[in-house]
Image: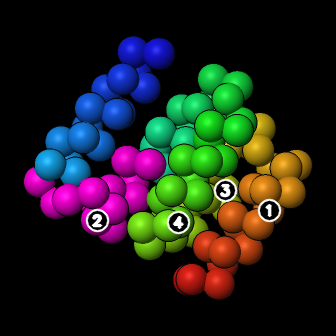
Amino acid sequence: EEALRWYRRALAIREEIFGSGHPSTGWNHYDQACLLALSGDGDGALATLNRALDIGWANNRIFNDKDLDSLRDDPRFEAILDEVQERL
Protein backbone atom coordinates (compact mmCIF):
# COMPACT_ATOMS: atom_id res chain seq x y z
CA GLU A 1 0.00 0.00 0.00
CA GLU A 2 2.81 2.40 0.80
CA ALA A 3 4.52 1.68 -2.52
CA LEU A 4 1.30 2.47 -4.35
CA ARG A 5 1.09 5.81 -2.53
CA TRP A 6 4.61 6.63 -3.70
CA TYR A 7 3.78 5.71 -7.31
CA ARG A 8 0.70 7.90 -7.18
CA ARG A 9 2.72 10.77 -5.72
CA ALA A 10 5.31 10.41 -8.48
CA LEU A 11 2.52 10.52 -11.06
CA ALA A 12 1.07 13.65 -9.46
CA ILE A 13 4.47 15.37 -9.57
CA ARG A 14 5.01 14.39 -13.21
CA GLU A 15 1.53 15.65 -14.10
CA GLU A 16 2.26 18.96 -12.32
CA ILE A 17 5.37 19.37 -14.45
CA PHE A 18 4.17 18.08 -17.83
CA GLY A 19 0.39 18.19 -17.55
CA SER A 20 -2.20 15.47 -17.12
CA GLY A 21 -2.17 12.88 -19.85
CA HIS A 22 1.36 13.71 -21.04
CA PRO A 23 2.97 10.64 -22.65
CA SER A 24 5.80 10.72 -20.11
CA THR A 25 3.32 9.61 -17.44
CA GLY A 26 2.78 6.29 -19.22
CA TRP A 27 5.55 4.55 -17.30
CA ASN A 28 4.09 5.76 -14.01
CA HIS A 29 0.79 4.11 -14.95
CA TYR A 30 2.56 0.96 -16.13
CA ASP A 31 4.52 0.64 -12.89
CA GLN A 32 1.36 1.16 -10.85
CA ALA A 33 -0.36 -1.54 -12.88
CA CYS A 34 2.47 -3.95 -12.10
CA LEU A 35 2.17 -3.22 -8.40
CA LEU A 36 -1.61 -3.65 -8.50
CA ALA A 37 -1.30 -6.97 -10.35
CA LEU A 38 1.24 -8.23 -7.81
CA SER A 39 -1.07 -7.26 -4.96
CA GLY A 40 -4.01 -9.15 -6.48
CA ASP A 41 -5.98 -6.20 -7.83
CA GLY A 42 -6.38 -7.39 -11.41
CA ASP A 43 -9.22 -5.01 -12.23
CA GLY A 44 -7.21 -2.05 -10.98
CA ALA A 45 -4.15 -3.20 -12.90
CA LEU A 46 -6.10 -3.53 -16.14
CA ALA A 47 -7.74 -0.14 -15.69
CA THR A 48 -4.34 1.44 -15.05
CA LEU A 49 -2.81 -0.23 -18.10
CA ASN A 50 -5.68 1.13 -20.17
CA ARG A 51 -4.93 4.62 -18.85
CA ALA A 52 -1.32 4.17 -19.97
CA LEU A 53 -2.54 3.18 -23.44
CA ASP A 54 -4.96 6.11 -23.55
CA ILE A 55 -2.08 8.56 -23.22
CA GLY A 56 0.03 6.81 -25.84
CA TRP A 57 2.22 4.41 -23.86
CA ALA A 58 3.34 1.20 -25.57
CA ASN A 59 6.42 -0.90 -24.90
CA ASN A 60 7.34 -4.51 -25.64
CA ARG A 61 8.29 -5.05 -21.98
CA ILE A 62 4.62 -5.85 -21.30
CA PHE A 63 4.87 -9.13 -23.22
CA ASN A 64 7.36 -10.72 -20.80
CA ASP A 65 6.95 -8.80 -17.56
CA LYS A 66 6.46 -11.39 -14.81
CA ASP A 67 4.79 -8.76 -12.63
CA LEU A 68 1.77 -9.06 -14.93
CA ASP A 69 1.57 -12.87 -15.01
CA SER A 70 -1.62 -12.89 -12.93
CA LEU A 71 -3.37 -11.06 -15.79
CA ARG A 72 -2.28 -13.28 -18.67
CA ASP A 73 -5.44 -15.44 -18.80
CA ASP A 74 -7.77 -12.44 -18.76
CA PRO A 75 -9.22 -11.55 -22.18
CA ARG A 76 -8.99 -7.87 -21.25
CA PHE A 77 -5.24 -8.24 -20.86
CA GLU A 78 -5.04 -10.04 -24.19
CA ALA A 79 -6.81 -7.06 -25.77
CA ILE A 80 -4.24 -4.74 -24.19
CA LEU A 81 -1.43 -6.87 -25.60
CA ASP A 82 -3.04 -6.71 -29.04
CA GLU A 83 -3.24 -2.92 -28.79
CA VAL A 84 0.39 -2.64 -27.75
CA GLN A 85 1.46 -4.94 -30.57
CA GLU A 86 -0.37 -2.77 -33.11
CA ARG A 87 1.43 0.33 -31.84
CA LEU A 88 4.94 -1.11 -31.99
Q: Is residue 24 above or below residue 43?
A: below
Residue 69 rendering spot, x and y as whole percentages: 74, 42
Q: CA distance from mark 4 to mark 3?
A: 17 Å
Q: Residue at x 54, y 32 (%)?
A: 35
Disc ID at residue 31: none
Q: State the residue position of label 4.
A: 53
The residue stretch that appears in magenta: 17-29
Q: Is residue 51 above or below residue 28?
A: below
The numbered mark, 1 or 4, whose residue comes first in the sequence reads 4
Kind of residue indicated by mark 2: His
Kind of residue indicated by mark 3: Asn
SS assignment for the magenta stretch, majority: helix
Mark 2 nearby-residue class (10 Å; few <14, some 14–19, many ≥20): some
Secondary structure, mark 2, is: loop
Q: State the residue position of label 1.
A: 78
The numbered mark, 4 or 2, whose residue comes first in the sequence reads 2
The numbered mark, 1 or 3, whose residue comes first in the sequence reads 3
Q: Nearer the viewer, mark 2 or mark 3?
A: 2
Quarter of image, res 45: top right
Q: Is residue 56 above or below residue 76?
A: below
